Image (cartoon, grey):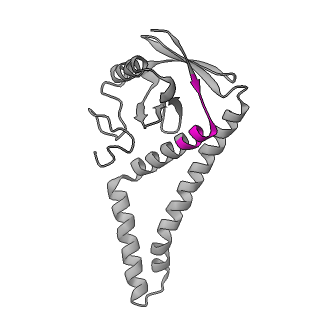
Amino acid sequence: MNEIIKLRYSEDLVRESVRAFVGRTLVKAMGRRGWIVIVGVVIWGAYCWATGERGVMTWLALALPVIVGLLGAWIYAVHYRNSLRKFRAMKEPEATLSCGEEDFTMESSLAKVTLKWAAVVEVWRFPRFWLILFSRSQFATLPLADLDAETQALITRKTTDAVGWEADSGGKRGFVREGKEKEGVG
């Protein structure tokens, strides 16, 4: 294919992509059981509080959602600050993407990188953009407004070939969960 595609970015897109990345990362890291445990601990803490128990364990149980919330906010702030710093350092808020059969290249005024498709760990799909993940903490944002159907199909095919299944959004092999539209799946 090797057509050069211009990708346009904005602060809103940066903010939205970081929010999506951090949100899905936290949900994925905690898992369903983790969230059930947190809710259970908070319910237990509320019960203890209601029955007059004001011990250290009660306070810790009630502080747990605050601690998790602060941790999430801190992770978001770090990723957002780093992403915004890179965005603002760009001469123009755009990059180019060139997809080939073996690799793909992204280039902006800051850097140029060519990677094999095998470097892609997952593709998280959202209504306005895709996040191409290279590790648990590194990703690139592809604005869908700039990607035609042919390029989207190529990226899907090449990432499927690279990881051995359709790189997905839900941490399960064999299907793709599209952003918020199918939130209940998986």
Left or right side of 94 for 102: left
Where residue 120 appears, x then y in whole percent? Answer: 44, 26
Q: Name the residue located 37 percent from the left edge and 67 percent from the top edge.
A: 39
Magenta-drawn segment: 7-16
Where residue 43 appears, x then y in whole percent? Answer: 37, 75
Residue 185 versus residue 63: which sits nearer the camera? 185
Q: Name the residue located 43 percent from the left edge and 88 percent from the top edge.
A: 53
Residue positioned most to the bottom = 52
In the image, residue 45 above or below residue 171: below
Q: Name the residue located 47 percent from the left edge and 23 percent from the top edge.
A: 147
Residue 37 versus residue 123: which sits nearer the camera? 123
In the image, residue 66 above or below residue 32: below
Magenta span has 122? no
- The quarter of the displayed image where residue 108 is located: top right
- The quarter of the displayed image where residue 165 is located: top left
Q: Name the residue located 66 percent from the left edge and 28 percent from the top edge.
A: 93
Residue 49 versus residue 81: which sits nearer the camera? 81
> Is the magenta region chiefly helix, strand or loop?
helix
In the image, residue 149 above or below residue 63: above
Where residue 143 appears, x then y in whole percent? Answer: 51, 30
State the quadrant of the N terminus. Answer: top left
Left or right side of 126 for 146: right
Magenta span has 13? yes
Residue 38 versus residue 143: which sits nearer the camera? 143
